[in-house]
Image: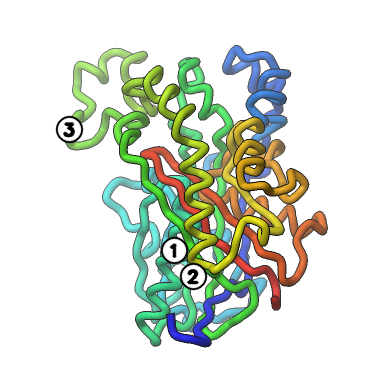
Amino acid sequence: MKKGFHVGILNYSIYLPEKTITAEELSELVGIKPEILRDKMGINRKHVGGPEDHPGIMATKAAKDLLKKTKVDPKEIDMILYAGETYSEYVCWTVAIKIQNEIGADRAYAWDLSFRCAGTPLALKVAKDMMYADESLKTVLVAGGNANAYLIDYKDPLQSFMFDMSPGGFALILKSDYSENEILGTGIITDHVFCDDVIGKYGGTLNPITEEIAKDPEELRKAKLISLSDPEGMKLRLAERSLPDFTGAVALALKASNLTAADIDFIGITHINPKAHYAIMAELGIDKEKTVYLSDDGHCGHVDQLLALDYGIKQGKVKDGDICALLGAGTGYAFACSIIRRGKG
């Protein structure tokens, strides 16, 4: 990129439902002992959505809070990029345009990016690259929401690795020629051997929900939820491939930033089990104190990296000039990491 070009994060907002469920309460629903939920799965508690907690609504709430916080006029926004889940309020619907309507960003154009729970780091890269290519993009709103928690089948023990999922939304404003909270490089890996492992099998064009399915309450319940096509095979492949995929995405981001793992002062990782979380850090040689593990929030999808960073700032773990790695992963499987230099540098 041209010398002197910078894109920075003006500010961000996070929306999380107020209601939570503890490990003890979740245990009653999933049949897993509370101590296993806490110690092995990293769930002390997690957020539970209410009747208004849907991806577009949550992203809009975060966006409105952000505009109030920054005092940015919505009519200054040149583009809105929705980096949230496509499982949202409606089918065949562009969430970003709804956000545009709700906040009154009349000058902007709005569109959706889909990358499961690796979407936030990718969105930072896409927005930055577009701002570089198009000088008219001075102010960009990136917002997202995730309610995939509503798709998880608590009756299926094979889905236990997704029992941590929680609803949430976020928004951030990017400014060109803004050197604070600067977005540096991004690394992306898509590991296609997992492409069909986690799917919503029914309700799409290939397998619509038929009248026959609808007549059976249990079949209809399962048809509305996530399914695993090869759970045992996926488990074996994840054991072999997920760690190098996670660390590989970080390595690519560092290379694009002209940095090394030794430069990382803080890493915010999507919520996974504690063993895997700290294995990533050990592999990269990052001290385990340079993170915040989201044991009291669960996996809030696209929100996780910003949420961990927010905790890091509030706990004094992140200061001006620190190099922060934001690492996400989503089914498919996708792995993405963006590097940010916190504050004024």
**Residue 31 coordinates in the image, percent (x, y):** 60, 12
The residue that disc 2 covers is 141
The residue that disc 3 covers is 206
Q: Nearer the viewer, mark 1 or mark 2?
A: 2
- Secondary structure beneath dot 2 equals strand
Quarter location, residue 127: bottom left
**Residue 104 coordinates in the image, percent (x, y):** 46, 74
- The amino acid type, in three-letter code, at marker 1 is Ile
| Residue at mark 1 to residue at mark 2: CA–CA distance | 10 Å
Q: Residue at x 23, y 36 (%)?
A: 204
> Badge 1: how crowded within 10 Å, few (<14), some, or many (20+)?
many
Tag 3 or tag 2, which sits nearer the N-term? 2
Residue nearest the observer in this picture, 183 or 146 = 183
- The amino acid type, in three-letter code, at marker 3 is Leu
Dots 2, 3 in contact, CB < 8 A: no
- Secondary structure beneath dot 1 equals helix
Tag 2 or tag 1, which sits nearer the N-term? 1
The residue that disc 1 covers is 99
> Badge 3: how crowded within 10 Å, few (<14), some, or many (20+)?
few
Dots 1, 2 in contact, CB < 8 A: yes
| Residue at mark 1 to residue at mark 3: CA–CA distance | 30 Å
Query: In the rendered image of this protein, does residue 147 appear above or below residue 126?
Result: above
Q: Where is the C terminus found, in terms of image quarters?
A: bottom right
Can residue 176 be spotted in the picture?
yes
Tag 3 or tag 1, which sits nearer the N-term? 1
Query: In the rendered image of this protein, does residue 104 appear above or below residue 99?
Result: below
Residue nearest the observer in this picture, 132 or 286 = 286
**Residue 215 coordinates in the image, percent (x, y):** 26, 15
> Badge 2: how crowded within 10 Å, few (<14), some, or many (20+)?
many
Query: In the rendered image of this protein, does residue 152 appear above or below residue 253?
Result: above
Q: Where is the N terminus found, in terms of image quarters?
A: bottom left
Whether residue 130 sits left or right of residue 280 in the image: it is left
